[in-house]
Image (cartoon, rainbow, N blue to C red):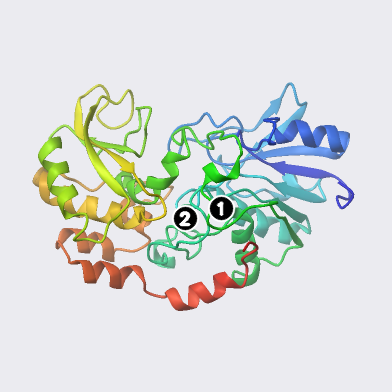
Amino acid sequence: QARMQGNIGYLCHSASVTPGLEHGALALKRLFGPRLKALFAPQHGFATDAQDNMIESPHFFHPFLQLTVYSLYSETRVPTPQMLEPIDTLIIDLQDNGTRVYTYIWTMVLALEACAKAGVRVVILDRPNPLGGIRVEGPISEMAFRSFIGWRPLPMRHGMTIGEVARFASAHWGMDVPLEVVPMSGWRRAFGFSECGLPWVLPSPNFPTPDTAWVYPGTVLLEGTNISEGRGTTRPFELIGHPNLQAFPFCESFNQRLDKRGLKGCILRPAAFIPTFDKFQGQVCQGFQVHVTDPSACNPWELGQWLLHSLFRELGPAFAWRQPPFEYVDDILPIDLLNGNAQLRDWVETQGALDELRHIQYLGYPEFMDRRSEVLLYA
């Protein structure tokens, strides 16, 4: 509090809570009183109630907090000069999930850019990466496939906290803004969320539990297909299915190949579900639930690529790539935006081999890992 000068803005969502589950906006209003001038909300809204991508939230006046809430997933995804004009410091407090395609890091990056232009200081209240901070997975996204799920080049699983991503942006993407990251106390890079001793508040509507994080870097790829990624169920991104899939033979075959593909720490269990909304609403989907048995050994991004590889072959003509628009991009297939390149879609369609997948995955890694090591905050 002593370091905060002038008026304050606060970028937050429903997971922006204290260890005692008090919403951060209430805590900051108690600390700063009338100096807290405005709230800002990312995708899914201040209350985390808006489903899916391209479902925008409006600006509104919060009747209890008596503050304007500016939506940064509306007609703008960037704080405007008018929004920033009353404030001297923007506090960013968002629970990320450690995956490039989760938009909160890009809301933060765009806010950094806007604050640099407006002369507004930024303070990041760091939060845990639910996937831990050691493993990095997936190829570095290409700028030719830039979108709001890949605004700058990052691997799918980046292995950084949101504060470290902010430091990366400042050091390597030219975000020339006065920046302070308030680090966590006691966090270690090997921690999953369960090791943190903190309450879990879902950061978006389809992220109900920390278990979702362990599969999301891979199963989010199903968003780029006509296969259900479990939206409309109580276990989104863990349940995967399609009305034409034969659940038991598919799981038996896939599970037998796990060791050959170097996939450890996970298993598929045959399952059926009926989505209450989204793909195949009201229809029975045959498929599976992905169970992570050993998070430290599981490579969810590679699992997701092999699922696409196998489902493409298994479903044949019933398999289809989702068509644009997707995250406001009209001329690129969603799967290519999710992957950050077109090579992985080609690998699926040509039924490529393991060595080809590994080659695609690690392109550009030495330089990225060196740059990443410069900004890490935790042992």
Q: Position of residue 79 (x, y in %)?
A: 66, 48
Q: Position of residue 72 (x, y in %)?
A: 60, 43
Q: Residue at x 76, y 43 (%)?
A: 9
Asked if residue 150 is positioned above or below residue 235 in the image, the reply reads below
Q: Residue at x 32, y 41 (%)?
A: 291
Between 350 and 58, the one nearer to me in the picture: 350
Q: Residues within 10 Å of mark 2 (few under 14, many from 20)?
A: many
Q: Residue at x 77, y 62 (%)?
A: 178
Q: Position of residue 349 (x, y in %)?
A: 16, 59
Q: Quadrant of residue 249?
A: top left
Which residue is under mark 1?
Answer: 105
Circles 2, 1 touching at the beta carbon (< 8 Å): yes
Which label is found at residue 220? none
Question: In the picture provided, is 58 more to the left or to the right than 236?
Answer: right
User: Of marks 2 and 1, which one's residue comes earlier in the chain?
Assistant: 2
Q: Residues within 10 Å of mark 1 (few under 14, many from 20)?
A: many
Question: In the picture provided, is 74 more to the left or to the right than 324?
Answer: right
Between 181 and 268, the one nearer to me in the picture: 268
Which residue is under mark 2?
Answer: 100
Between 245 and 264, the one nearer to me in the picture: 264
